[in-house]
Image (cartoon, rainbow, N blue to C red):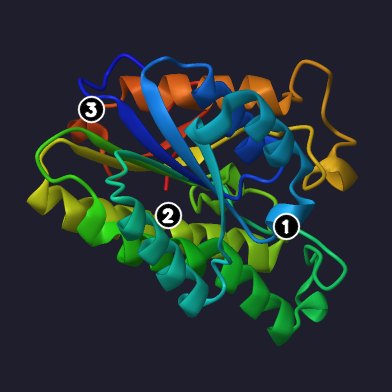
Amino acid sequence: MNSFKETIVAVVVGSNRGIGLALVQQLLTDSSVDIVYAGCRTISAAQGLNDAVKTYGDRLIPVSVDLTSAESVDAFRGFLEFEGAQPNLVINCAGILHNQDVKPEKRLEDIEIGSLRKYFDTNAIGPVLLAKALKNILPTRRRVVLGNLSAKLGSVGDNKLGGWYGYRASKTALNMFTRNIAIELGRRNKELVCVGLHPGTVDTRLSRPFQRKETAQSLLLPETSAGLLLNVLDQLTPEDSGGFFAYDGCRIPW
């Protein structure tokens, strides 16, 4: 990444698979990246990360963190402080679209309060807790880039189909949190960039049940999306901070 004058200390959360793991792997191939702290819930289950450690050694440090737990996020910050880390690249990829407990709602009748809370806990509240935790260990006099993986479905202006109430609303909330974080942290560091990112429709476990309308051309591999997102982040300036950008660099309407 050529926009950083100093070596990069990266934090990637949600790194056990998919786009997060691909971001970790691509960052480690970049000679300007000194170290990557890869956060995920369960390190023992993160086979891709554990395999990468065998290749990259102490340039990759997996760290357990659960963004739905304030205590876990605080412990994550404590570990970074103990390490003396001052991350200048932070990418949050943690998110939920569906699992055994939640699935996108097509109609109002499908809405359940427990599912809504799970969407917001992971997709919106967790990322802002992460920003709160890292605020005081981020550099204040040099380039810092923060990226939250959002989704085009979180755009109010682009919503033409409705549905997916919890997922859409939680990503919209994440976009507002991202904008607020950009404003607050930008006051203390004029070189800071904080943005929301749309990774495209990526061939991961998260999106696989919803790929029927995608073509081979529109469906991205995780490594393709990761490379494009890193390129976008590398080109952004402080004037872009608080914005919402797609993997191709285009702005997305709020």
Can residue 128 be seen here? The reply is: no
What amino acid does circle 1 point to?
A: Leu
Residue 148 located left or right of residue 133: right
Can residue 207 be seen here? The reply is: yes
Image x and y of residue 28, in percent: 52, 24
Q: Disc 3, disc 1: CB below 8 Å?
A: no
Nearest to viewer (mark 3 / mark 2): 3
Position of the N terminus by quadrant: top left
Task: Identify the image quadrant of residue 213.
Answer: top right
Give the residue pinned by disc 3. 237
Q: Is residue 106 above or below residue 156?
A: below
Q: Nearer the viewer, residue 47 or 17?
A: 47
Q: What crowding class fits label 1: few (fewer than 14 Cα within 10 Å), some (14-19), or many (20 or more)?
A: some
Q: Disc 3, disc 2: CB below 8 Å?
A: no
Q: What crowding class fits label 2: few (fewer than 14 Cα within 10 Å), some (14-19), or many (20 or more)?
A: many
Task: Identify the image quadrant of residue 2.
Answer: top left
Q: Disc 1, disc 2: CB below 8 Å?
A: no
What amino acid does circle 2 point to?
A: Asn
Q: Nearer the viewer, residue 82 or 148?
A: 82
Mark toward the start of the polypeptide (1 vs 2)? 1
Label 2 element class: helix
Label 3 element class: loop
| Point 82% across, 76% down: residue | 110
Give the Cα separation between the discs numbered 3 and 2. 18 Å
Give the residue pinned by disc 1. 97
Give the residue pinned by disc 2. 175
Give the Cα separation between the discs numbered 1 and 2. 16 Å
